[in-house]
Image (cartoon, rainbow, N blue to C red):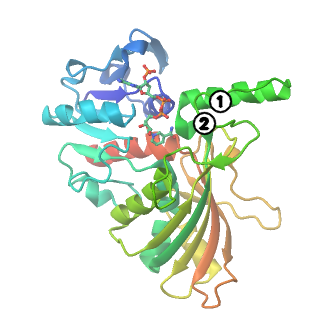
């Protein structure tokens, strides 16, 4: 089996390589592809070095599965021709996520959809994956009618260059030097700002609209009322989210905890006595979405509302790991 990692030099691509190495995928099964800028770069892989090649149509010939994480423009140019040549593309960009003939899949949520593909499967938005992994197991028991979510998103969501920018700016601010943002639109060190995606006439930015539309698609339920506020925080990796849920029927916090403790891909971290709850530094590098602060929302007298706090590594479960889990679904 030949697997291509497209965007292998990027934040998500590097994470994919590290997960594939952990899963003992042999080096001779892998093709690492990126832009012409990186062609010839040597990348360490499982005790050896692999050479990055330029992404071209020919470079994908004979590839069985291509894991794309090179931006929507690259996906639009290369994914459909590759699929037409027999490669199954699993894509991390937003290029085709909402297309009706492209399954949008989280293996813990809608694995059955993966098998309906026509050569192209989309990996959902990272904030959406982290929320959906936590919400889905409750939704199956007691349908969720409304979601209010506020995110605290790591800079790595904007790629490897944004991570470097946060490191550099942090040093400069501590040294009393001025900073000049180049990758993200505002200073990321010691700052919090509204998500850097375009805002439409509704007042919502693209990230917020993805959380609504992609959740509807994967849950196969467009009636769930969802509102999101997406924000960047000066964290290198792992997104956090405050989630308020209103269910169809009254539900107790203990019931929610029981459901989440048995849920795949979730780890409950909810130590009230120790005041220890999900944190980005604990979620970073982990496969599970951490869930805590599970409590009854006392502002809703119907007893139907629950508040939670979640953290998940968006480079891993929000992107690379989810894509590799989809690959496993198709090959096992
Ligand atoms: N970061 C996240 O948390 C996250 C989560 C979910 C989804 N995603 C999506 O995943 C994709 C990659 O994100 P990232 O954060 O890994 O970005 P990144 O760190 O900026 O990496 C981008 C990668 O794409 C490659 N690339 C750019 N233009 C290319 C071209 N014309 N042909 C071939 N390769 C090209 C780059 O290669 P060079 O090094 O040669 O430039 C690099 O390997 C984006 O679509 C993003 O929306 C990211």
Identify the residue at horizontal 62%, vertical 31% (top origin).
163
**Residue 83, quarter of the rendered image:** top left
Where is residue 76 drawn, in percent x and y?
27, 36
Q: Which residue lies furthest to the front in this view?
A: 201
Above or below for 40 versus 64: above
Q: Can the viewer see residue 109?
A: no
Q: Name the residue under label 1.
A: 181
Q: In this view, does 56 lie above or below 21?
A: above
Mark 2, Cα crowd under 10 Å, few <14 / some 14-19 / many 20+, is few
> Does label 2 point to a residue whose CB lies under 8 Å from ligand 1?
no
Give the CA separation, mark 2 to mark 1: 6 Å
Front residue of 266 and 134: 134
Q: Where is residue 295 in the image (x, y as percent from the top left)?
A: 68, 75
Q: Give the SS element for disc 1.
A: loop
Between 102 and 17, the one nearer to me in the picture: 102
User: Can you give x and y, in whole percent of width and height, for residue 50 in the image?
Assistant: 41, 14
Disc count in the image?
Answer: 2
Q: Is residue 34 left or right of residue 18?
A: left
Name the quadrant where ligand 1 sits: top left
Residues at circles 2 and 1 in contact by the CB criterion of under 8 Å? yes
In front here: 138 or 185?
185
314 horizontally vs 235: left or right = left
Q: Mark 2 points at which residue?
A: 185
**In this rendering, position of residue 124 left or right of residue 258:** left
Q: Residue 84 carries which label?
A: none
Cβ at disc 1 under 8 Å from ligand 1: no
The residue under the point 33% across, 16% down is 54
The correct choice, above or below, for 211 with respect to 24 in the image is below
Disc 2 secondary structure class: loop
> Percent position (x, y) of residue 202?
47, 62
Q: Split into 4 quadrants, where in the image is the N terminus?
A: top left
Residue depicted at x 34% and y 61% = 110
């Amino acid at each position: 089996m030949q697997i291509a990692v497209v965007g292998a030099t990027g934040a998500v691509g590097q994470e994919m390589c590290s997960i594939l190495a952990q899963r003992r995928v042999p080096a001779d099964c892998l093709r690492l592809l990126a832009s012409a800028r990186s062609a010839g770069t040597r990348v360490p892989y499982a005790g050896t070095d692999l050479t990055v090649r330029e992404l071209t149509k020919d470079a994908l010939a004979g590839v069985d599965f291509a894991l794309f994480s090179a931006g929507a423009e690259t996906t639009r140019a290369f994914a459909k021709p590759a699929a037409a040549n027999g490669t199954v593309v699993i894509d991390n960009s937003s290029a085709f996520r909402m297309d009706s003939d492209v399954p949008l899949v989280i293996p813990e949520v809608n694995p059955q959809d993966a098998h309906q593909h026509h050569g192209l499967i989309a990996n959902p938005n990272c904030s959406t994956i982290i929320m959906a992994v936590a919400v889905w197991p409750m939704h199956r028991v007691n349908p969720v009618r409304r979601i209010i979510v506020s995110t605290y998103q790591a800079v790595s969501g904007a790629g490897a260059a944004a991570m470097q920018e946060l490191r550099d700016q942090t040093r400069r601010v501590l040294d009393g030097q001025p900073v000049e943002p180049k990758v993200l639109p505002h200073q990321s060190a010691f700052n919090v700002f509204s998500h850097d995606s375009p805002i439409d006439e509704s007042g919502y930015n693209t990230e917020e609209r993805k959380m609504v539309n992609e959740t509807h698609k994967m849950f196969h339920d467009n009636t769930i009322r969802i509102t999101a506020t997406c924000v960047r925080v000066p964290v290198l990796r792992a997104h956090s989210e405050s989630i308020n849920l209103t269910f169809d029927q009254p539900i107790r916090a203990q019931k929610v905890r029981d459901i989440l403790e048995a849920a795949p891909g979730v780890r409950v971290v909810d130590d009230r006595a120790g005041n220890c709850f999900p944190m980005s530094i604990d979620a970073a590098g982990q496969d599970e979405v951490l869930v805590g602060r599970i409590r009854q929302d006392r502002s809703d007298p119907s007893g139907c509302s629950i508040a939670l706090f979640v953290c998940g590594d968006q480079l891993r479960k929000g992107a690379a790991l989810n894509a590799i889990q989809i690959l496993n679904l198709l090959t096992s």
